[in-house]
Structures are given as structure tokens and as C-alpha cells.
């Protein structure tokens, strides 16, 4: 008899509606390719803990914001840890996987990140700006994000200090994302139109660009998994980190040509 193939539980929410993206299309494509090498079943994150025992490993993909199923996600993490089930990405990420506290830590240690504070009394540490971005520390997919004028930012933080993040509203030239598999760079995409975040086209990074992105991959310390480094090109020309997505980064595979898309699938496989 042929050897048994690895059994993969692939977490996704095919019904999740994301602004400017079709999560379901990406996961339908990726699973169609992974089935050549794995016995694979798709599973909503709410069902993951109950189904783990039947599989050798779990892949976490386009599940939508964890906020929509926090109890189920916690149960899945606990069950996977208890069983020693390999998870892709591993559940030890220090970036978006754990909330956005890392933006404060990176700001404090001098990394090239949009300056971030979480208390009204620390607003003086931010560069002066006409507008500020206020967003939940546990937010995702722009949920709860507000842009407020300078004279309203202190009230916007108010009694929610510690639960919100505040950043200056950067007048950036464009956003660019760098995609890594197991710490190996795969491709980069950017949004030339600042008003259309998910209208992405291929981007050829410079050595300096890649050095910027790799700093955050190395900081996070995951030995395997898919990570996306999101940055913006600041007015002075430097890149600043917007976020490091290490849980379920959307991949925008439809923006790639066949060569790069196939190379990505091979790397993940």
C-alpha cells in the first residue's frame, strides 16, 4: 500500500466578507493546489478544536478577524498545544497574532515604525500632526479605526487608555507589502493609489527595502510560516512599518503572474 499522506486541517471562513478582497477565492485556489500533496479538509475556526484529533497538522489561513470567534480561537490554541499539533503559522508570533502591543514595543526600541502610543499622557511623544489615527489594540481589518483631528485626539483616547493605539496620520506616498514563507522572501506588492489599498501591483524591492522588511521577520523569530510586512513610504522617502501580519495574512495571489504564484505554492507546500 502507498504510504499515508499527511492530513491537514485547513482553517478558513469562506463566507467572510472582506473589503476589497475575496478571501474565499484565495483559499479555494490554494487548497486546490495543496491537495496534490496532502489529504486536506477545510474547516471554520469555530469547529477547529473539536476536529483536531483527526489531523496531523493545522494550517491557519483566511479566517477573518479573531475578534469574531475569540472563545473558539482560544479553545483551538489550547487544544493544539495540549496535543502538540503542528500549526502553520506556529502560535508563538509576537506581532498581530498577539494584538498590536508590539507597535508600542517597536516604537520604544527605535525600530522604523509609525510612532505609536496608547495613553493620552504620552501623546507628546508623537510627532505633531493635523490628524491622528486611533484604533483598537485588539483590532483587525480596520475594524474600529478612526481618524480624528489634533484637537480631538485626547478625548478620543479618554477612558479607553491602554485599549487604544494612537498614531500620527502619515501623508505617505504609497503602501507596500513584503511576503515571506519560512523567513524566505517570496514577492512584494504595492498600492500606487493611496485611496485603493487592495488594488495591488507587483513591486521590485531594492536591497534597502528587503533589509527593512527582514528586520521585522528576524525580530518576530518564527522559524516557519507565512508573514506579511506592511509598510508605507513616508514623505522623507523612508519606509515605516504599518503592521506585521503573522496570523492569517491575506496573500493577494491574484495580483501575481503564474511564475510567482507557482513559486509561492511550492514554498508553502
Image (cartoon, rainbow, N blue to C red):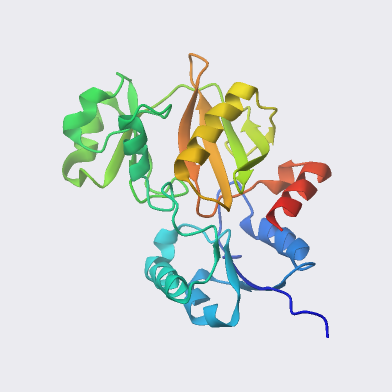
Q: Is residue 11 above or below residue 50?
A: above
Q: Horizontal placement of 33 versus 236: left or right? A: right
- Image coords of residue 53 (percent x, y): 54, 82
- Image coords of residue 110 (percent x, y): 36, 26
Q: Find residue 115 and report its image quarter.
A: top left
Quarter of the picture holding the C terminus: bottom right
Q: Is residue 264 above or below residue 114?
A: below
Q: Residue at x 73, y 70 (%)?
A: 38
Quarter of the picture holding the N terminus: bottom right
Q: Find residue 104 and report its image quarter.
A: top left
Instruction: Return the residue found at the far bottom.
Output: 1
Q: Horizontal placement of 137 versus 172: left or right? A: left
Q: Residue at x 48, y 13 (%)?
A: 236
Instruction: Return the residue found at the far top.
Output: 236
Q: Horizontal placement of 145 versus 243: left or right? A: left
Q: Horizontal placement of 187 versus 124: left or right? A: right
Q: Residue at x 65, y 37 (%)?
A: 199
Count of number-bearing discs: 0
- Image coords of residue 203 (percent x, y): 69, 30
- Image coords of residue 188 (percent x, y): 66, 35
Q: Is residue 108 above or below residue 186?
A: above
Amino acid at each position: 500500500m502507498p504510504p499515508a499522506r499527511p492530513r491537514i486541517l485547513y482553517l478558513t471562513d469562506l463566507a467572510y466578507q472582506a473589503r476589497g478582497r475575496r478571501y474565499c477565492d484565495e483559499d479555494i485556489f490554494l487548497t486546490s493546489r495543496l491537495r496534490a500533496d496532502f489529504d486536506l479538509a477545510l474547516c471554520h475556526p469555530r469547529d477547529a478544536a473539536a476536529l483536531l484529533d483527526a489531523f496531523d497538522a493545522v494550517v491557519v489561513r483566511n479566517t477573518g478577524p479573531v475578534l469574531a470567534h475569540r472563545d473558539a480561537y482560544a479553545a483551538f490554541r489550547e487544544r493544539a498545544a495540549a496535543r502538540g499539533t503542528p500549526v502553520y503559522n506556529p502560535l508563538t508570533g509576537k506581532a498581530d497574532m498577539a494584538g498590536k502591543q508590539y507597535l508600542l514595543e517597536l516604537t520604544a526600541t527605535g525600530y522604523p515604525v509609525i510612532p505609536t502610543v496608547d495613553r493620552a499622557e504620552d501623546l507628546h511623544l508623537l510627532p505633531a500632526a493635523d490628524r491622528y489615527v486611533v484604533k483598537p489594540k485588539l483590532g483587525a481589518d480596520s475594524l474600529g479605526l478612526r481618524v480624528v483631528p489634533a484637537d480631538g485626539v485626547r478625548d478620543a483616547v479618554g477612558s479607553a487608555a491602554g485599549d487604544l493605539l494612537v498614531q500620527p496620520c502619515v501623508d505617505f506616498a504609497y503602501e507596500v507589502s513584503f511576503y515571506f514563507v519560512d523567513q524566505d522572501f517570496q514577492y512584494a506588492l504595492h498600492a500606487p493609489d493611496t485611496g485603493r489599498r487592495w488594488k495591488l501591483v507587483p513591486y521590485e524591492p531594492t536591497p534597502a527595502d528587503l533589509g527593512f522588511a527582514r528586520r521585522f521577520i528576524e525580530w518576530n523569530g518564527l522559524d516557519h510560516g507565512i508573514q506579511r510586512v506592511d509598510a508605507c513610504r513616508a514623505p522623507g522617502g523612508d519606509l515605516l512599518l504599518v503592521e506585521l501580519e503573522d496570523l492569517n495574512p491575506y496573500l493577494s495571489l491574484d495580483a501575481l503572474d503564474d511564475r510567482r504564484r507557482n513559486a509561492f505554492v511550492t514554498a508553502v507546500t
